[in-house]
Image: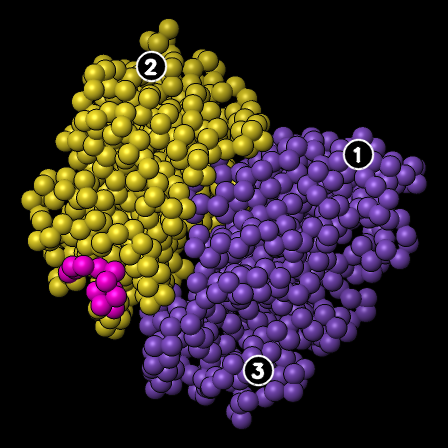
Chain colours: A yellow, B purple
């Protein structure tokens, strides 16, 4: 049957568009996060060149009763791009053109397969900034960033991916191409359809193009790395930074000791002589004039006892070395293993307490366990990795334990990574029955046959 | 029949909840913008106290085969709150509680009937800012601001209403109450349902509560009023302001001469000795330290010939007198009459040219016509009023003329006021057939019987 479908697709789409090569299919059977034993081989891999190719593929899948899972850079952390069962994998890697950059209107129009880094670099070459940024920038693709509503390091100032999309084009489950390439900041002409596709993980439509919002490139960046004595100081530091740096505040990334130790070991960079209770990476960007204000904030923080030790980056390379510590999170997968990891959202003022309670709970249950925590605390969002050498690895029990505590703190079980496969059984911790029912109703209305990435989200 | 429905509602909801008093119905038959001859009397007015009352009303309307039009402050400018035919009007004026203000988490939870001003003042009393602001602040209600995705004076910095809503509660067409009162900045747990209700003008659900985003109250505000020689100077001034003021730039409101003349006459305030070609109201807010930067921007603008004359407000009352000129737009309705007015979006760099072409076209056709233009040009959004004493007033011809030109410039026919009744026949100028079809499909999925504000938007 599989061969028949692949042959039908090849006949319709062209010879170099479809692959059933086992090694190729294996490479598209899982993402960075997926345990190899949970990999799902797709029936075939399709690599379209145009939105019409995508539409034709969707129609063929529907005719043959198989599903379709769209894939970007496969860097997702919730399994959203792992093929559904009996699915064709659709990779947009060939649709990676930067179509237009408009520095005056402050927009960039791109195909969904462009990598995040391509978009950042195109914007920069026109003196503009595309502010979304995350560790996988060189591999992840814009369509995936939109489909999962990616977050990252600069949400505090510029918002999530959702806030950076002005318009898009998507292919629906019936093969209709919906073109909504709005370029204006304000357009209240009817329903704002793009938000249905953003963050719905390929279950309502396949995003093929987008118009993204650009910002003026800041003239200077100011970075500091500091050690803080307690969580109360973290809260007071955030209020000080917000008040004095205002909207030039770009990043407020907190690292707990176990994570900091891991990262400084991985990168061979340990600037502090005395250990701190928390480590903070602070970034502001604006004009060169702001350097004085930034310096003043740091001095005030040290005088007030909020910061016990700290460094202001004196060069771009020094700033880069600070950020290396934060970017080492990508290596938790390979060097802090086996772990169960989490992307949760809690009211900022309660995160310190939440982590304390969690660590205690985990270590009581698994005495060898280690908990590495870091994240965007100003957004209320932290990432947590729980490692234990317990065999077999108690993934489910750790998850239940963490999500129950998140529920108690009224948090979200997925701040920025999405639901995908990995978290769907926990979705009810963060969404009401009315919300879940409405999600199902929308899915049924837009994809009655269940062609688009079935089994994901709910 | 009407009496029967009203009696059934009174029986179900309680005696002081339903009114069929002719003067009451007349007051709920039109909004600020509606020509009295287009007023539509509702069958009855219902004034619920709870979301359950709203749900019961929706179910009763469905049973009796009548429609329901939700009303806020009736200050809308597109007729969205004018009752549909055979409709009950639902006013949320009794559901106006401020439920909770959380300065640390930076959120405010409110019922949908609270006025914008109530919300602004509650936030301020906790040292926080709710940044949405528009002329009707004392009358318009939050539910209406959300239902129409209101814009206003500070979109440049804080975004539209859509960007300020974290969570909401809505009653669907079948009477289900969907509670999605998310309070976190980041929540990627499934589809983001709130965006379907925001800006859909009461056609997909009735918003009953919301969690809104607050900001730290800026420590100081800096305002300037200046005259500029040409539109090229406007563009250069915007780039200068963006570069130097960064995200402290709050408002960049441009007034064309005819509007400025009207406003300064209405308010008896004419600060400039020499007329300018454009008048600009510039606002930045942040710390007191920013005063120097603001001054430097103005000096640079004068030296560079971008500004021919200008004033920096030396006090709050002087700043208020500058803003009076902008707020006089509310009086166009009564003192620049009869007119046809527009709320359009065009790429910022082309607005100057667009207005020139438009004025020429209008005056050629109606030699007595006057065109008053003002707006948020940094957002690409201007408001236009075309006045002529021609009888009968050629409303439709003026509209066709303006919207055709907007289409030519690839703009939006409704930047911030919505579609309602007034613009639905022009919606195709700004939305593709695929978009219109998808809007209809969503409406059919969520409101198959067409109970909620039928006949609006499309």
Residue A219 percent coordinates (x, y): 25, 66
The chain to which mark 1 is attached is: B
Which residue is drawn at the image coordinates 22% and 37% (left, top)? Answer: A372
* Among the 4 quarters of the image, the one containing residue A286: bottom left
Which residue is drawn at the image coordinates 72% and 40% (left, top)? Answer: B54
The mark lying in front, picked from 2 and 1, is: 1
The residue indicated by pointer 3 is B321
Query: In this rendering, do the residues under marks 3 and 1 share a single chain?
Result: yes
Q: Is residue B184 magenta?
A: no
Query: Which of the two discs, 3 and 1, labels the residue nearer the N terminus?
Result: 1
Inspect this view and state whether residue B129 appears.
no
Which residue is drawn at the image coordinates 22% and 59% (left, top)? Answer: A307
Asked if residue B376 is positioned above or below residue B227 in the image, the reply reads above
The residue indicated by pointer 1 is B60
Q: Which label was assigned to residue A43?
A: 2
Asked if residue B198 is positioned above or below residue B218 in the image, the reply reads above
C-alpha separation, residue under disc 3 versus residue under disc 2: 69 Å
Nearest to the observer: residue A337 or residue A69: A337
Magenta span of residues = A300-311
Mark 1 Cα-neighbour bin, 10 Å: few <14, some 14–19, many ≥20: many
The chain to which mark 2 is attached is: A
The chain to which mark 3 is attached is: B
Circles 3 and 1 in contact, beta carbons < 8 Å: no
Residue A447 percent coordinates (x, y): 52, 25
Q: Callout 2: helix, strand or loop? A: loop
C-alpha separation, residue under disc 2 versus residue under disc 1: 51 Å
Classify residue B450 as left or right of residue B194.
right
Residue A142 percent coordinates (x, y): 33, 40
Q: Callout 1: helix, strand or loop? A: helix
Mark 3 Cα-neighbour bin, 10 Å: few <14, some 14–19, many ≥20: some
Q: Callout 3: helix, strand or loop? A: helix
């Amino acid at each position: 049957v599989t061969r028949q479908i692949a042959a039908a697709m090849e006949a319709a789409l062209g010879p170099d568009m479809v692959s059933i090569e086992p090694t190729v299919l294996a490479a598209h059977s899982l993402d960075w996060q997926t345990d190899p034993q949970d990999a799902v081989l797709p029936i075939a891999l399709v690599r379209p060149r145009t939105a019409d190719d995508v539409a034709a593929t969707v129609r063929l899948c529907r005719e043959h009763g198989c599903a379709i899972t769209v894939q970007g850079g496969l860097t997702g952390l919730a399994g959203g791009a792992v093929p559904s069962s009996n699915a064709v994998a659709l990779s947009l890697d060939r649709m990676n053109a930067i179509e237009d950059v408009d520095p005056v209107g402050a927009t960039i129009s791109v195909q969904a397969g462009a990598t995040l880094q391509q978009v950042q670099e195109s914007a920069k070459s026109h003196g503009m900034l595309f502010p979304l940024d995350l560790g996988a920038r060189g591999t992840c693709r814009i369509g995936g960033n939109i489909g999962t509503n990616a977050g990252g390091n600069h949400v505090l100032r510029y918002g999530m991916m959702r806030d950076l999309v002005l318009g898009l084009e998507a292919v629906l489950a019936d093969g209709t191409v919906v073109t909504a390439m709005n370029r204006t900041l304000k357009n209240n002409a009817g329903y704002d359809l793009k938000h249905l596709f953003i963050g719905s993980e390929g279950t309502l439509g396949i995003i093929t193009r987008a118009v993204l919002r650009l910002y003026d490139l800041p003239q200077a960046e100011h970075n500091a790395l500091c050690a803080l004595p307690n969580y109360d100081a973290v809260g007071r530091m955030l209020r000080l930074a917000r008040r004095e740096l205002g909207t030039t505040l770009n990043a407020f990334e907190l690292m707990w000791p176990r994570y900091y130790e891991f990262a400084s070991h991985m990168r061979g960079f340990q600037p502090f002589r005395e250990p701190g209770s928390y480590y903070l990476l602070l970034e502001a960007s604006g004009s060169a004039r702001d350097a004085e204000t930034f310096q003043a904030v740091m001095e005030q923080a040290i005088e007030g006892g909020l910061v016990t030790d700290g460094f202001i980056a004196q060069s771009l390379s020094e700033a880069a070395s600070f950020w290396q510590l934060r970017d080492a999170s990508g290596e938790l997968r390979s060097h802090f293993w086996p772990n169960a990891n989490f992307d949760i959202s809690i009211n900022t003022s309660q995160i310190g307490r939440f982590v304390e309670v969690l660590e205690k709970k985990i270590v009581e249950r698994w005495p060898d366990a280690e908990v590495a925590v870091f994240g965007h605390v100003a957004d209320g969002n932290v990432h947590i990795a729980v490692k234990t050498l317990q065999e077999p690895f108690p993934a489910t029990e750790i998850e239940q334990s963490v999500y129950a505590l998140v529920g108690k703190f009224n948090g979200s079980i997925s701040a920025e990574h999405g639901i995908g496969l990995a978290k769907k059984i926990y979705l009810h911790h963060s969404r009401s029955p009315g919300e879940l029912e409405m999600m199902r109703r929308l899915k049924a209305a837009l994809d009655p046959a269940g062609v688009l990435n079935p089994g994901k989200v709910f």
